[in-house]
């Protein structure tokens, strides 16, 4: 399931279970492709627009996009930077859960 961060409810969204957070921007070509791939995976996904939530991106060490950060029960578990294939995303989630 894909959700888009609307307000500053980031920590509420990642506090329980497994959540894959996609830091992206609308103008970013690789981010658009990543969004299409994320629609095909059976994982809770929270998309965070870095243009709207710059401070949040900075707090989480996002230096380039797309950046995927996996959270388990509110804690950051692992991070991937750059466009990932569907298989890479599934393996990334599997090895960290």
Image (spheres, grey):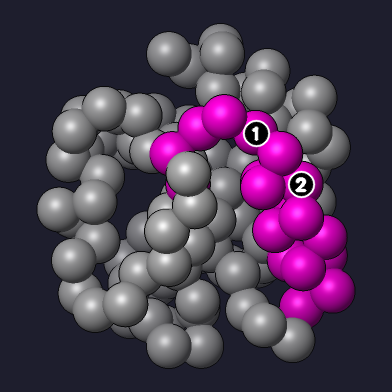
Q: Which residue is mark 1?
A: 41
> How busy is the neighbourhood of tag 2: few (under 14 within 10 Å), some, or many (20 plus)?
some
Residue 8 higher or lower than 85, as above or below: below
> Residue, x 66% and y 66% (percent of image)?
65
Query: Which residue has dot 2 on it?
Result: 37
**In this orientation, which residue lies closer to the viewer: 4 or 75?**
4
Q: Position of residue 18 (x, y in %)?
A: 35, 29
Q: Could one spot residue 61 in this view of the protein?
A: no
- Identify the residue at image location x=60%, y=69%: 24
Front residue (pair 14, 77):
14
- Answer with the quarter of the image where residue 75 lies: top left
Left or right of 66: which side holds 16? left
Residue 41 pos. (x, y %): 65, 33
**Quick check: 21 above or below 78?**
below
Mark 1 and mark 2 in contact (Cβ < 8 Å)? yes
Asked whether residue 88 is in view, the answer is: yes
Q: Position of residue 71 (x, y in %)?
A: 35, 36
- Indicate left or right for 19 with 62 as reference: left
39 inside magenta stretch: yes
Whether residue 25 sits left or right of residue 87 in the image: it is left
Element at badge 1?
loop
Q: Around disc 1, counting alpha carbons within 10 Å, would you say few (fewer than 14), some (14 to 19), or many (20 or more)?
A: some
Region rendered in magenta? 28-45
Question: Residue visible at 74% across and 86% down?
Answer: 27
Which type of secondary structure does the marked residue at label 2 adopt? helix
Quadrant occupied by the C terminus = top left
Is residue 85 positioned above or below 6 on the image?
above
Is 83 positioned to the left or the right of 47 in the image? right
- Spatial CA distance of label 2 from label 1 is 7 Å
Residue nearer the viewer, 6 or 76: 6
Q: Quadrant of residue 63?
A: bottom right
């Amino acid at each position: 399931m894909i959700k888009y961060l609307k307000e500053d409810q980031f920590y509420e969204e990642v506090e329980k279970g497994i959540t894959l957070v996609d830091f992206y921007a609308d103008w970013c070509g690789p981010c658009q492709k990543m969004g299409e791939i994320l629609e095909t995976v059976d994982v809770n996904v929270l998309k965070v627009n870095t243009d709207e939530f710059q401070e949040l991106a900075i707090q989480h060490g996002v230096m380039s996009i797309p950046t995927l950060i996996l959270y388990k029960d509110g804690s950051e578990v692992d991070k991937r930077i750059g466009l990932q294939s569907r298989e890479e995303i599934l393996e990334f989630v599997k090895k960290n859960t």
